[in-house]
Amino acid sequence: MKKFIYIFGIVVFLFSCNDKNTYQIEGRLSNLDDAVLYVVFESSESNTIDTVLCNGRGQFSISHEQDDNLQVVTFYYNDRKQWFSVYPEAGKPVQIKGDANYPLLLQIKGGRANNKLSEFKKKAAIPLKERTDISNSREENPLENGEGASQLANANRKIRRIAQDFITKNSKEEASAILISEHFIDSENMEQTEELLRLLSPELDEFYIVGNLKSEIEKAKTTIVGAKAPDFRVTNIYGQTLTADSFLNKYYILAFTALWCDMCQTEIMMLDDIAAKYSKDSLDILLISLDDEIDEVRDMVRQDTIRWNLVTDSAGQAINLFEKYNVNSLPKCFLMDKDGIIKLRTTNGEELKQIVDEIMQ
C-alpha cells in the first residue's frame, strides 16, 4: 500500500509540474456557425497562428507550451468576424463558456485578469448585450444607421461608466488596464485615457498594455490641434512626389476619403466650394483615398471640373498616411497653416469651410 501511495504521489507531482509549464484552455460555445476557431498566440517576440476544431456541442480544448513572452491568446470565429481574448497564466487552466453571438459576454475563468474581466462583464451585462444587438442590427439594416448610432453611443456611455467605476476600485489589477484599452481609446480625445492611466497603481507600469496605452497617447498627440503636422512622402496620380514641405508658405488641407464612402464626397465635405473659392497658391488640397483601383479614381477625376491633387492606395501609401495621422474613420480633414501647424481636424465639411473662410479673410 505504501508503495502504491509513493508511486501515485510521483505521478501527481509529474503531472502538476507539467501543468505549470503549459497553458490549458477549454471552452464550450453555443450558436457557433463554424466549428473552426482561429487562434492567435501573441507574445512580445512574435505571433503564431493555429486552428482548433470544436465538436458538435461547441466544445474545444488547446494546450500551449509555456512561453514567458506570451501576452494574450485571441480566438477568431464565424468567418473571423467575431473574436474574444484570453489573458493566460501558466499552470492556471482557463474555462470559457457562453453564447458565441455575444463575445463581449463570454465568461472566461482562470487566472486573475480573466477572472476580474468576467466580474466586470457581469456588472455591465445589460449594456454589453445592448451594444452587440445594436451593432448587429445596424449591419443587417443599414438604413437604420442614424437611429442606431444614437443607441450605440448611449450603450457605450453606460459601459464606460461601469468600466470607470471598476477601474477606480481596482487600480492594482491588470484587468483595469485592459478595460482602458478596450473602452477608452479615442485618437480624437486621449485626455480621458491619460486620466484613467493615472489612477492605476505604479505596480502596473511594467504591464505591456500600460506601455501600449502610453505609446498610443504619445502617438495621438502628434496630430492634435497645435501640433506640427507629421511629415510624409507620397506620389499623386499624376506621378508628382509630395511631402509636407511641398505645402510650405501656404495653407493646405489633407482630406482622407474613399470613393465608396458617401459622406466623403468632396461636395459634402465642402471641398468643391473651398477649391473654387481659393487659389492653390494660397490654399491647397491633397485628397488621400483608400481606393486602390487607380483607373476608377482617374475616371472620377476626369468627370470633375476640379483638377484634384489626389493620392490613392495603389502602393500602400494612403494606409501609411492614415496611420501617421491617426485616422480610424472616414471622412477626416486636417487644416494646416503656412508653417505646417495643425489648425483643425474635423469630420464636418461646414465646420471646415467656416474655419477656412475665417482664416483666409
Image (cartoon, rainbow, N blue to C red):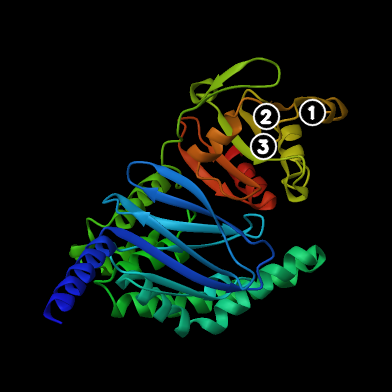
**Which residue has dot 3 on it?**
290
Q: Viewer-proximal residue, 214 or 93? A: 93
Q: Quadrant of residue 134?
A: bottom right
- Residue type at tag 2: Thr
Q: Are marks 2 and 3 in contact (CB under 8 Å)?
A: no
- Image coordinates of residue 208 in percent, x first then y, are 30, 54
Q: CA distance from mark 1 to mark 2?
A: 17 Å
Q: Is residue 255 left or right of residue 212?
A: right
Residue at screen point 73% across, 44% down: 270
Q: Is residue 309 left or right of residue 70?
A: right
Residue at screen point 45% across, 84% down: 123
**At numbered mark 3, what does the secondary structure look like: helix, strand or loop?**
loop
**Which residue has dot 1 on it?**
306
Q: Dot 1 surroundings within 10 Å: few (below 14), some, or many (20 or more)?
A: few
Q: Quadrant of residue 111?
A: bottom left
- Image coordinates of residue 276 in percent, x first then y, are 76, 33
Q: CA distance from mark 1 to mark 3?
A: 20 Å
Q: Is residue 35 left or right of residue 300?
A: left
